[in-house]
Image (spheres, grey):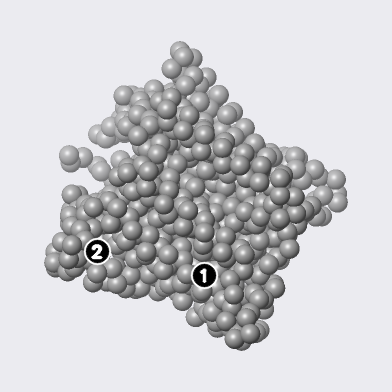
Amino acid sequence: MSVDIAVETPTGSAPPTEELVAPPTTTRGIRRPTSAQIFGIASLAAISILPVPFGDFGYFIGQYAIIYAILGLSVVVVTGYAGLISLMPYSFAGIGAMATGVAMASWGWPFWLAIPFAAVATVPFALVVGVTSVRLKGLYLAIATLTISNALGETFFTWEAITGGDSGHFVDRPVVGPVDFGGDLAFYLLCLGAVFVLLFMVEGLRTSRIGRAMLAVRDNELEAQALGINVAKTKLVAFVLSGMIAGLGGAFLAQLLISVTPNAFQSPFAEASSLLLVTLVAIGGMDRAIGAFVGAIALVVQQQIFNGFEFFFAFVGIYAALTLIAFLLFRPGGLVQVGKILGHLTRTRPVLGISIILIILVVNVGGAWLILSLS
Amino acid sequence: MIYAAPVTEVTIFGLSSGAVFALLALGLVLIYRTTGVLNFAHWAIGLMGVVTYVMVTALGVPPQVGAALGLALGASAGVLAYRLVFKRVGRGRQVIVILIAIGLAQFYSSLAQFALGFEQFTRLRPWLPTGDVHIGQVAIRASEIITAVTAIGIAFGFLVWFRLSRTGRALRAVAQNKEAAMLSGIDDVKYSSIAWGIGSALAALALLLVLPHSAGEQGGLITTFDVTPFGTLLIPAFGAALVGGLVHLPMALVGGFIFGLARELLILAPKPWSDLRASIAAILILILLLMRTERFFATRQELEALE
């Protein structure tokens, strides 16, 4: 079996793979950032200030998209890096959200203590799933995670001591000195800080020892074993890290929604949300951390803008599904790969490249604006 | 409410919901064996059949004709999925295939949301007789019995056809060894399309049997729970297919009844055990997965060919 979701060289105009070339170093041995890295950081900064002109509505959508990006990062670790299909990322987020609810509403903990507690609370569950993943491969694991998500919805998320019944827990946003995170801008900045830290951590994981072990296990399990990699341990670590990231995202999700109700994490809505997470990561680009961020921005922003209008909400569902299928068939590296191709095109034929990028932006942004102003 | 003989009633309930699981599972196994795709979009494709049924009965078409049209549209949704998408994915790229199936599930369920107009629930007219049948002192809905009998009949008819007919033999040949089948002149794309068509029609039939008759005289409802990518019955259907290791059709049929009966018969169990009812399917599935049931029904080579 070859589980192959790496960026494959497309036929025709193939961009040179930049990862193979070591980044240039200065004489003192400090890595100078490549132009791609500078461009990436600049676009992150540009995306971060996008909600500012839209005020509180913009900040709310921004918070939503960023929290989905955090949850998407958990998919990047387990599916993108380790090649294990997990259809339960949203259930891990739910565990984190419930842990936050219990810690803050019942025990009176501050939010700063509830965040690590939410991350740690997912560990026992992640270990169980991880042990399952050692024995089950491919689609059997997909069925197993789907089933576990369903079973958690029937047991854990109906347990009143944990969920606080149907009305759920009410969690207040923290106040630190003069800064009140109940305000939309302050909470947006807090989420932004969290996602940037996690982005760099997950991107760094890729080149770390355990991250490279995950990539090796994804590409060929037998070869990885022959190289002396402990496959079982690698899979367990992948699930535990992924669970912790999702749990942390769940803590922020609880803060965003202010009241944490259990029915969002019960069948079949938990499965649907997990699918959305997997979809947005696959659209963004599975095997890079930035892919989760790009995918979340592209998908969740549209979905939240159109949320008031059910017609467009379903329209976004169709649009996202078709984009996903088209990307998987033709460009499995997602938006990150498309971005690389466009970047390459811009360097070799600047006029053509820039005009294509502009056309894409105008069609998407203009289309959204048109639909909003018409309705 | 206390019934004179709850055992009979509960057993019939179990058989009829088991029959629905069995139909779904047969479609899943047929598609998986012939094309190596575990169809996560099975429920959503079946939903297309129900949507057609809702739309044409609203136009005044008799419900029975509507159900037939629903079957046809369900089948074409499946064939389209294969022709346009899965045909183009090479074998051996399992993660991509699973993700694409998930994308299709979202596509078809969003389409269903569109077509049903975002109501909390949509009423469905029944197309089977709705009266009660009396067995001894127990009154049982006729639609339950018809569901069980139809599903069992269709499932057995399908198994016989799969074993004996020319098309069935060609389908089995493609399932067992695709390359050898192609060498002996069997058109792989044609027979894979047939497998997708039949499998999807079975899914549409299962949904058309259960959804329009869930509330007896009044017909049935589609709720927001049903219009989701995986719906409410796909997970037990996976379980039923796992009883046959995802590859064995007769055992998938048996599996459907195991899951249906297990769920309904637990109602009769004493208090702490009857609480297991909601999660019995999940428990059974995890046991089946860890047993690796596929070992018993397929050789190593066949399994590697499916991956």
The location of residue A166, given as percent across then percent down, is 19, 49
Q: Looking at numbered disc 1 in the image, what kind of residue is underneath it?
A: Glu
- Dividing the picture into quarters, in which one does residue B5 lie? top left
Task: Say whether marks 2 and 1 touch (CB < 8 Å).
Answer: no
Q: Which residue is mark 2?
A: A100
The location of residue B161, given as percent across then percent down, is 66, 40
Measured in 3D between alpha carbons, the distance from the residue under mark 2 to the one under mark 1, in whole angstroms, is 26 Å
Mark 2 and mark 1 lie on one chain; the one further toward the N terminus is 2
Q: Residue at x 59, y 52 (%)?
A: A335
Residue A371 at least partly seen: yes
Q: Looking at numbered disc 2 in the image, what kind of residue is underneath it?
A: Thr
The location of residue B217, given as percent across then percent down, is 31, 24
- Furthest toward the front, the residue is A27
Between residue B286 and residue A173, name the one nearer to us: A173
- Which quadrant: the C terminus of chain A? top left
The chain containing the residue under callout 2 comes to A
Classify B24 as above or below A277. above
The number of numbered discs placed on residues in the rendered structure image is 2
Q: Which residue is mark 1?
A: A203
